[in-house]
Image (cartoon, helix red, strand yellow):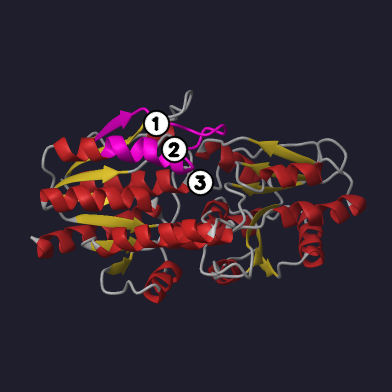
Amino acid sequence: MRIILASRIFAPEPGAASLRLRAFVNAAARNGHEVTVLTSTAPPGQTSSSAAVHPGVRVRRAPVLRDRAGYVRGYLQYLSFDVPLAVRLLFARRPSAVVVEPPPTTGAVVRVICALRRLPYFYYAADVWSDASAMAGAPAFIVRTVRWLEKFAIRGATRALSVSEGVTERLAELGIRNSVATVGNGVDLGDFTPEGDGTETDGPYVVYTGTASEVHGARIFAEAFRSVHARLPGAILVFIGQGSERAEIERLAATLPVGTIRFLSRREPHEIARWLRGASAALASVKPGGGYDFAFPTKLYAAAACGTPMIYAGVGPGRTFVGEVEGGVAVEYDVDAIAQALEHALRQPRNAEARARTAAWAHLNIDIDAVARRAILETEAAARTDR
């Protein structure tokens, strides 16, 4: 088959989507398919060797508008990718299938162009964007518009490839059932491993990696750390990445001595792995009560692959996940409960054997390459049926 992948984000740009899509196109190329990626120009300085793609994959980049943090995030930013994408798809050499990554605006563009050219397409349902918009406090008319676009994009697809049972169930609640296949999600086990050096700081630390948005409610870790600092003044909380709660977390950090809560911009996977290996615990959360209880923070996969103990706060399938992994603990989304878990983790001596067992479990259960193979097999079968 000749496959086109359309995505505003792709390797080497850091992010869960980049890792997942790189694995997908690599698996497709290994299966003998001809693959072209239509994506955006990578941010300056991001040329990681860990982002290598199969020689059979062609990556075609185009300039795009980014926000101040360097992300393609926001309606104008999406538009700057989607409008040129329509032209690129319209005149691209005829593919057997198109695979599209959210946001729903991109999915809607792909549906229209594929309808004009009578092409099958697949929607990679990594999230439910309309729910995320609602939880972020977007105006009702924006949420309704995103919801309509999302349904429009998915319902026209030959198949939606869902990353979790939670996403599949939520799509069913929105009336999208028959065209959804749950392929799962995972982590690149080449990037995240227990072997190698861990980052050293001047005190024990816990680390939160990735997006900190309203969905996650990560600010509660900063709130809890104030009482932890009172009892463990040398302990450190590290945030790596961006997100809508970043400014509020920085405000909370300003109430503590300088360096108690530290912030790093986006990092390449091998750098994040070093921070995870050196941490007393990796943190993740999903804030309850926002209609997003099905969400799963993929940062948990990276932590498990590195063998790092995990602390999960809130609701959703993340609670089940950490319960299956040695060293994982799930607590309520409560400042006192989180503070207690943080303090316990920071006081624990490093247990190399337990970390090795956690990493071994991860290598058997959450390999992103196995997920990619399932996604490709689903795409192949559905494309043959569609033809």
User: In the structure shown, which secondary structural element does the residue marked by tag 2 occupy?
Assistant: helix
Residue closer to the observer: 313 or 154: 154
The segment highlighted magenta reads 58-85
Q: Which residue is mark 1?
A: 64
Q: CA distance from mark 1 to mark 2?
A: 7 Å
Residue sitting farthest toward the front: 141
User: Which residue lies at the image location 48% right of the left edge and 23% below the top edge?
Assistant: 45
Q: Residues within 10 Å of mark 2 (few under 14, many from 20)?
A: some
> Residue 368 location in percent, x, y?
39, 53
Nearest to N terminus: mark 3 or mark 2: 2
Residue 283 numbered tag: none
Query: Label 3 sits on what residue type?
Result: Phe
Residue identifier under label 3: 192
Classify residue 275 by image quadrant: top right
Image depth: mark 3 or mark 1 in front: 1
x and y percentages locating residue 206 in the rendered image: 72, 49
Residue 10 in sight in this render: no
Residue 377 visible somewhere in the drawing: yes
Q: Quadrant of residue 247?
A: top right
On the image, the x and y values in percent for residue 329 come to 67, 66
Quarter containing the C terminus: bottom left
Q: Residue at x 12, y 48 (%)?
A: 117
Contact (CB < 8 A) between labels 1 and 2?
A: yes
- Residue matched to label 2: 77
Mark 2 belongs to which amino acid? Gln
